Image (cartoon, rainbow, N blue to C red):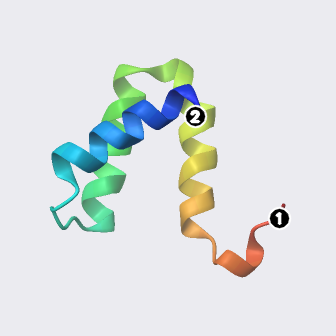
Amino acid sequence: MYFTDRGIEELESRRGEEEVTLAWLADRLRAFVDANPDFEVAIERFATFLARDDEDFED
């Protein structure tokens, strides 16, 4: 298990039943980067990963 799995598991257990829009997610990612500018590159990469079709994903 990766360290990040704990945060993912917490997200799933606390909010896993909710439905959200991508606009809501984008807003939350922007707020996170505003509060944590050191993570800007990681969030940009994550957002790009989510935005691209699975066929574009390179192993």
**Residue displayed at 64% across by 47% down:** 45
Q: Quadrant of the C terminus?
A: bottom right
Left or right: where 49 falls relative to 33:
right
Residue kind at label 1, given as amino acid type:
Glu
First of labels 1, 2 by sequence position:
2
Alpha-carbon distance for marks 1 and 2?
Answer: 23 Å
Disc 2 marks which residue? 1
Front-most of residues 7 and 35: 7
Disc 1 marks which residue? 58
- Check the image and report above or below for 32 versus 59: above
- Check the image and report above or below for 31 versus 48: above
Instruction: Give residue 1's position: percent from left, percent from top.
Output: 58, 34
SS class, disc 2: loop
**Residue displayed at 55% across by 67% down:** 51
Which image quadrant is residue 39 in? top right
**Residue displayed at 63% across by 78% down:** 53
